[in-house]
Amino acid sequence: MFFPILILAIISASGLLLFTFKKINRTILNLLIALGAGSMLAVSLVHIFPESLEQTELAVYAFILGFLFIYLIEEILTPHAHDHGHGDHTHEDPHEHYDHVAIVSFIAIFIHTLLDGLAIRAWFGISETLGYTTLVGVAIHQIPVSLSLAAIFRESKFKRNMQIIFVALFALAAPIGFILSDVILSHLSPIFTGLITAFAWGSLLYVATADLLPVIHSQTNKKYLTVSVFILGTIAISSMRLLEWQHDHPEEKEDIHTEIHTHE
């Protein structure tokens, strides 16, 4: 089982590549953030949302709690001492804005990826083929998420070493979930797992819509390219969920084909 864990950790660490450059072109960073916004939007609505509702109908309340929790954290803890004034209005220092966006993004994505690790281990318990298939699906969407998370941290005021540590910890989330799966799965009820994932869903959706979308909207340089990358990220991650669904529910797909042939 060591090999799939190693693969997942390496792919999840792809965001660390951004730290090999002392300076990154502003347009590239904006495009990566746009990709992250689209990825996070799709992960929260298309991946986490249905998974949490499958566990418990109470997930919608945990989602609202997660959404409101991050909103209140930003309202209460976001520093305003370094806001810049422009005539009759002020706006937050963009680097301070990314400080809390980076932390919230990290927490929400870490929880989701930890549970991905649990799912991968569960599939390996059924079949090695199913395990590797799930591993590939998770690994593919880890690449844009990891790069986007690294880009957000690069925009923050955290020290470079701390930025690297956070991205490295994210890379370990799925392997940790994989390793601890037997212990975690035996002690957590499906309802509690659903509530945790829904809380992460609400947090992630808030970051994608309230924090990252306004950044995309405010772009003046290569505006349409940035918007296109955002849409591409949303579609790509959403499509992966469709492939995962076909993989997880082959019997339903077969029933559909049988029904079609029956009508013919």
Image (cartoon, helix red, strand yellow):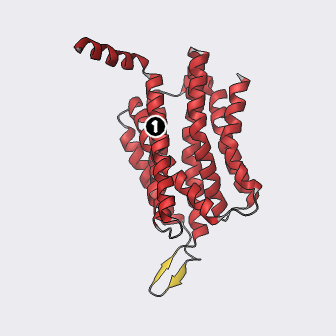
Q: Residue 54: give x, y in percent of width and height.
A: 39, 30
- Residue 132 in the image: state x and y as whole percent: 61, 23
Q: Quadrant of residue 57?
A: top left
- 187 lies left or right of 54: right
Q: Quick one: 83 or 149, which is closer to the camera?
A: 149
For the residue labelled by badge 1, is the local secondary structure a helix, a strand or a loop? Answer: helix
Q: Residue at x 52, y 28 (%)?
A: 188
Q: Nearer the viewer, residue 119 or 8?
A: 8
Residue 198 shows in the view: yes
Q: How many marks?
A: 1
Residue count near mark 1 (Cα–Cα under 10 Å), binned few <14, some 14–19, many ≥20: some
Q: Look at the picture and state if 75 lies above or below 184.
A: below
Q: Is residue 155 left or right of residue 223?
A: right
Judge whether 231 appears above or below 190 on screen.
below
Q: Residue furthest front?
A: 264
Is 219 situated above or below 152? below
Q: For residue 24, what is the image quadrant?
A: bottom right
Horizontal side of 81 relative to 59 (left or right) equals right
Q: Residue furthest left?
A: 263
The one of 110 and 144 positioned closer to us in this rendering: 144
Q: Quadrant of the C terminus?
A: top left
Q: Residue at x 67, y 33 (%)?
A: 8
* Residue that carries the numbered disc 1 in the rendered image: 239
- Residue 223 is situated, as x and y percent measured from the top left of the image, at 49, 65
Query: Could you say which quadrant of the image residue 235 lies in?
Result: top left
Q: Quadrant of the N terminus?
A: top right
Which amino acid type is shown beneath numbered disc 1? Ser
Q: Is residue 208 above or below residue 1?
A: below
Residue 254, x across and y down, in percent: 37, 16
Q: Is residue 99 visible?
A: no
